[in-house]
């Protein structure tokens, strides 16, 4: 018997809405590895740098958690300068 492979795309979507000076960001809380749920209550949306920056992540879970930790360190290193922290993290991550 030939089994059909499930070809549906499954991934996290982080949604951000900005209206009249207010911002809302949301994502699901489920972390999976293939078809196995690893964690059902992950926080994929976080406030960084004393609550002044919202970060949401999706994709390869291990990389995402590592990147978030490193990004927060870069934000602290560059006193909350979002663009500079992102650029420096990108340079570091790619080398």
Image (cartoon, rainbow, N blue to C red):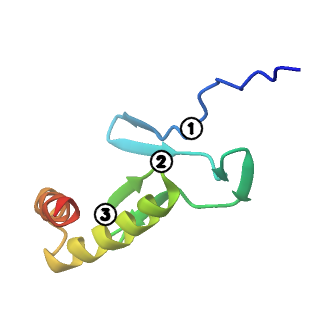
Q: N-terminal of the two: label 3 or label 2? A: 3
Q: Nearer the viewer, residue 11 or 84?
A: 11
User: Neighbour class for label 1 at 10 Å: few (<14), some, many (≥20)?
Assistant: few
Residue behind mark 1: 11
Q: Where is mark 2, residue-wise?
A: 58
> Quarter of the image holding residue 73?
bottom left
Label 3, label 1: how far apart the Cα atoms are: 27 Å
- From the top left corner, tell me how far across and down residue 21 is, in percent: 32, 41
- The mark lying in front, picked from 3 and 1, is 1
Q: Quadrant of the C terminus?
A: bottom left
Residue drawn at 61 percent across, 34 percent down: 10
Q: Which residue is located at x 13 percent, y 64 percent?
A: 88
Give yes or no for contact between labels 1 and 2 (Cβ–Cβ under 8 Å): yes
Q: Which residue is mark 3?
A: 52
Give residue 20's position: percent from left, percent from top: 34, 35
Instruction: Say left or right for 42 vs 90.
Output: right
Task: Give the structural element (helix, strand or loop) at label 1.
Answer: loop
Residue at (51%, 57%) from the top-left corner? 61
Question: Residue 22, how many percent across, how many down?
Answer: 38, 43
Q: Which mark is residue 1?
A: none
Q: Residue furthest front?
A: 1
Relative depth, front residue between 71 and 78: 71
Q: Earlier in the sequence, mark 1 or mark 2?
A: 1
Q: CA distance from mark 1 to mark 2?
A: 7 Å
Badges 3 and 1: C-beta atoms under 8 Å apart? no
The CA distance from mark 3 to mark 2 is 20 Å
Q: Is residue 80 left or right of residue 22?
A: left
């Amino acid at each position: 018997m030939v089994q059909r492979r499930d070809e549906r795309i499954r991934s996290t979507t982080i949604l951000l809405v900005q209206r009249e000076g207010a911002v809302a960001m949301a994502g699901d809380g489920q972390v999976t590895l293939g078809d196995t749920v690893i964690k059902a209550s992950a926080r994929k949306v976080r406030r960084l740098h004393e609550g002044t920056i919202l970060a949401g992540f999706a994709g390869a879970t291990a990389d995402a958690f590592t990147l978030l930790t490193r990004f927060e360190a870069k934000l602290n290193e560059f006193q909350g300068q979002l663009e500079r922290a992102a650029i420096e993290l990108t340079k570091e991550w790619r080398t």
